[in-house]
Amino acid sequence: MIGHLTYLSDDALGTKFGRLVNDGDIGTTGKEVGEFEVASYLNYQGDKFSQKFDANSYILITKMLDHFDLAQDYNDDPAKAFSHAQCQFLIVSFSSDWRFSPLCSEQITGSLMSAGKAVSYVKIESDQGHDAFLLPNSRYQKAVSLYLSRVSNELEESSS
Amino acid sequence: MINDTVPIGAWIEPKSRLLDLGCGDGTLLRRLIDDYQVQGYGLEIDPDSINLCIQKGLNVIEQDLNKGLKNFPDNSFDTVLMSQTLQALRNPHLVLDEMLRIGNRCIVTFPNFGHWQTRVFLSIRGRMPVTQQLAYQWYDTPNIHLFTYKDFEALCSERSIKILKRSFVGSQVLGLNNLCPSLFAKTAVYHLAK
């Protein structure tokens, strides 16, 4: 449930549920009367999740994510860690994403600039939290499509 | 748009690291990369301009200059460039200090508000000048700090900023720019150091 929360944003949850309380529709999903709607929503998502996945695998993956340290083998200097990169980068962040916050993306962008790598960075306004990267957003789509057509042009040029 | 790349080019080391603050649609940055093979990055805030930069194959970073440049380490660029943007910033003097912290050298260009056309506009018509270069009404202009090249030089001396070179762009008549820049320079271009 906590994992699920990190994919959403304050605003999105506020609009969807606010302080709505279940007023008596006990039935299908075992809602309790007087429970916040947001709680029964999260309970429902939690149940669904635990039936589909082994919860231990999720704990393990979460731990691995936590322990990942980009700059560990490079004297804690992320610019050095990126120095081997051969590719160009487009970094996109979403204003309401607190799973991968704009600040983190900005640090990555800064390290890539220090490493002298080709990088562009855009920060998209969105109230959809981490899920925003999967949802339609005209500015996001425009930036990614322009970037990809540039990549495809460069590939065509280099192969011809 | 006035071509202010002529003096800028002479002040840029080929293949050096260049940061362009307020790079707009990236026309100038693109030209400097093509002509001098600099490793260039542009900072911009306007989404449409950012898209145009992406299209041009530039490295463009979305960042609001008014919120500071603390994310850039000291002396991390050879040159920090700001073209026609100083007058639109909330705290131009603080951004200048930051530019000199980040860059070994800085290049700044801005419209000279003392140009005779703006003087005539204000004194004859009694209204704020709307010219080709300052093409906005007073209420919707992004240019919130209007100053002359003399004002800029006073600021440099106040803050102990070294003026390495300066150049004026404007009048078509040969020599007038440098003879009396106060009246004839439309754009002032400065090469600065700490």
Image (cartoon, rainbow, N blue to C red):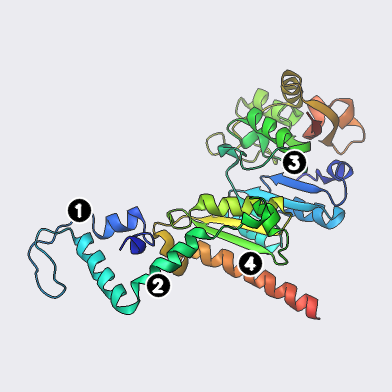
Q: Earlier in the sequence, mark 1 or mark 4?
A: 1
Q: Do the residues indicated by labels 3 and 2 lie within the same chain of the protein?
A: no
Q: Do the residues indicated by labels 3 and 4 lie within the same chain of the protein?
A: no
| Residue B72 picture location, percent across and down | 66, 42
In this figure, which residue is indicated by the disc labeled 4? A147
The answer to whether residue A136 is visible is: no
Q: Earlier in the sequence, mark 1 or mark 2?
A: 1
The disc labelled 2 sits on which kind of residue? Answer: Ser
In this figure, which residue is indicated by the disc labeled 3? B80
Nearest the viewer among A46 and B77 is A46
| Residue B14 picture location, percent across and down | 88, 50
The disc labelled 4 sits on which kind of residue? Answer: Tyr
Residue shown at the point (48%, 53%) measured from the top left: A101
Label 1 to label 2, Cα distance in Å?
Answer: 33 Å
Label 3 to label 1, Cα distance in Å?
Answer: 50 Å
Q: Residue under mark 2: which chain is it in?
A: A
Helix, strand or loop status at disc 4: helix
Label 3 to label 4, Cα distance in Å?
Answer: 25 Å
The disc labelled 1 sits on which kind of residue? Answer: Arg
In this figure, which residue is indicated by the disc labeled 1? A19
Check the image and name the residue furthest to the left: A24
Q: Quadrant of the C terminus of chain A?
A: bottom right
Helix, strand or loop status at disc 2: helix
Q: Residues within 10 Å of mark 4 (few under 14, many from 20)?
A: many
- Circles 1, 4 touching at the beta carbon (< 8 Å): no
Residue shown at the point (35%, 75%) measured from the top left: A54
A117 versus B139 height, above or below: below
